[in-house]
Amino acid sequence: MVWRLSTGFRGKMTTQISAPGATGVALERQGPLRKGHYSLDLRRSNFRLKAGIIYVWKVTLIESDQVSQQPKVLWNAWS
């Protein structure tokens, strides 16, 4: 699973793949993150996709507000 950041990012990035209603593989990275390609390596995680199951893949970028320290979701995508 590969995605691209088109600009640098200083917040937290999370990505996850799972079957609906199940716990899957997740990755969290704290910025600063450079622009470029990032990936979730399913083979390294010992995660195997099964035929006939629809999986949800989600990438979320979260930035903390410097004043209130409340997380703000900047971008949330799923497939």
Image (cartoon, rainbow, N blue to C red):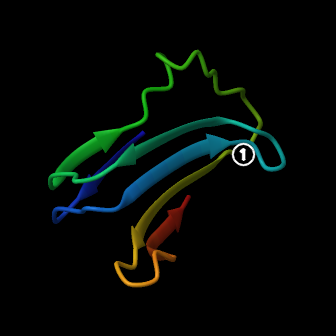
Q: SS for tag 1?
A: loop
In this rendered view, identify the residue nearer to me: 27 or 51: 27
Relative placement, left or right, of 47 versus 71 is right
- Percent of width and height locating residue 56: 65, 51
Amino acid at dot 1? Ile
Residue at (65% x, 27% y) in the render: 49
Question: What is the residue that sits farthest to the right in this orientation?
Answer: 21
Image quadrant assignment for residue 41: top left
Q: Is residue 43 left or right of residue 66?
A: right
Q: Quadrant of residue 24?
A: top right
Residue at 29%, 42% in the rendered image: 38
Instruction: Give the residue at the far bottom of this rendering.
Output: 67
| Identity of the residue drawn at 16% across and 62% down | 8
> What residue is pinned by disc 1?
54
Does 7 sit above or below residue 22? below
Q: Residue 5 at what x, y percent from top left?
A: 24, 58
